[in-house]
Image (tube, helix red, strand yellow):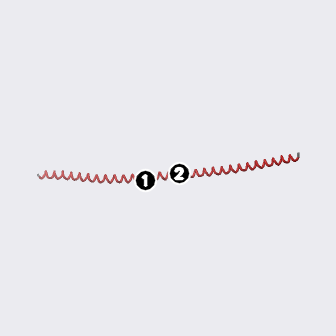
Amino acid sequence: MLENQEHYLQSLKKIKEVEEKAEKEIEDCRKKIESEINKLQSDLESAITSAKQQGEELVDSSIETARKNATSKTTTLIEDAKAKSENIISEIHAQDNKKILEILLKGVE
């Protein structure tokens, strides 16, 4: 009977050791998973920050490109308008000169 009790106690000790080992393994896995989750969260935050910065740079670049294009088109339009206005002024002056000559010639007759 004493032998059965010792065998029983040994079995309980082994069970206890196995339980403690299992608890330690579970705790180690939990810590590892928690660490991986924290790393993933940190990586995600970095990716979001990077994407935001790249997006802002793209918007800034697009705005600058649009501004340059608009400035170029505006300059072209202004130059065209100046050239046309000079042609119109020349035509007007030529017409005015013709009228002045006609008036002078009428006065001479």
Q: Which residue is mark 2?
A: 51
- Choose between 84 and 51: the one closer to the eye: 51
Q: Residue at x 24, y 53 (%)?
A: 90
- Choose between 34 and 86: the one closer to the eye: 34
- Choose between 10 and 94: the one closer to the eye: 10
- In percent of width and height, residue 69 lies at 40, 53
Query: Crowding at label 2, few (<14), some or many (≥20) Cα neighbours within 10 Å?
Result: few
Secondary structure under badge 2? helix
Q: How many marks?
A: 2
Residue type, label 2: Ala
- Mark sitting on residue 65: 1
- In percent of width and height, residue 79 lies at 32, 54
Question: Considering only order in the chain, which callout, 1 or 2, is on the residue closer to the N terminus?
Answer: 2
Q: Residue at x 84, y 47 (%)?
A: 7
Q: Residue furthest top?
A: 1
Q: Residue furthest left?
A: 109
Query: Crowding at label 1, few (<14), some or many (≥20) Cα neighbours within 10 Å?
Result: few
Residue type, label 1: Thr
- Mark sitting on residue 49: none
Q: Residue at x 68, y 50 (%)?
A: 29
Q: CA distance from mark 2 to mark 1?
A: 21 Å
User: Is residue 94 found left or right of 4 in the rendered image?
Assistant: left
Q: Residue furthest right?
A: 1
User: Is residue 26 found left or right of 6 in the rendered image?
Assistant: left
Secondary structure under badge 1? helix
> Quadrant of the image for the N terminus?
top right
- In percent of width and height, residue 8 lies at 83, 46
- In percent of width and height, residue 45 lies at 58, 50
Q: CB atoms at circles 2 and 1 under 8 Å apart?
A: no
Q: Residue at x 31, y 53 (%)?
A: 80
